[in-house]
Amino acid sequence: MGWSDQEDLICVLRNGIVLMFDLMCQQTNTFSVFDTETSGVLHSVEIWEDGIAALSRDMELHIVTGISKPSEFVLLKSFISMNDFFNR
């Protein structure tokens, strides 16, 4: 969870769904960090004022910028397994 620069609460679920709420607890936006052809499970998420960076379990990095009008880009796809990643 985190806050946008418009003071919306940003909640990112493990399946990649992003829920946004205003200060009156009204839902303002819903979208996915994954494209429509991809479904996955998130490993970690970082939120900043105007975007989200999400690392999936299959080591794809998804960046969402412009939270009010999100556009998703897969910037990195690595074939490193999680065991290799953490056993360095």
Image: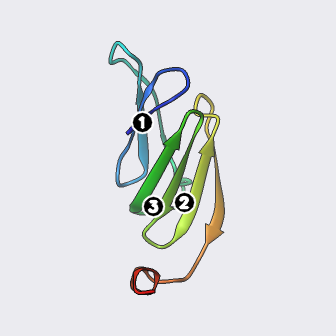
Relative to 58, say whether 81 is above or below: below
Residue drawn at x 57%, y 57% is: 62
**Quarter residue 2 falls in:** top left
- Looking at the rendered structure, the kind of residue marked 3 is Ser
Neighbourhood count class around disc 3 (C-alpha, 10 Å): few under 14, some 14–19, many 20 upward = few
In the rendered image, the vertical position of residue 43 relative to residue 49, given as above or below: below
Looking at the picture, how far across and down is residue 64, in whole percent?
Answer: 60, 45
Q: Quadrant of residue 67?
A: top right
- Three-letter residue code for mark 1: Gly
Q: Amino acid at mark 2?
A: Glu
Residue 25 pos. (x, y %): 32, 18
Q: Secondary structure at mark 1?
A: strand
Q: Which residue is mark 1?
A: 2
Which numbered disc, 3 or 1, marks the residue that appears first in the sequence? 1
Classify 10 Å Cα crowding around label 1: few (below 14), some (14-19), many (20 and above). Answer: some
Which element type, helix, strand or loop, lies under badge 3? loop
Q: Nearer the viewer, residue 1 or 73?
A: 1
Q: Which residue is mark 3?
A: 39
* Mark earlier in primary sequence (1, 2): 1
Residues marked 1 and 2 touching at CB (< 8 Å)? no
Q: Residue at x 52, y 50 (%)?
A: 33
Q: Residue at 61% across / 72% down in the picture? A: 77
Q: CA distance from mark 3 to mark 1?
A: 23 Å
Colour setup of the view: rainbow
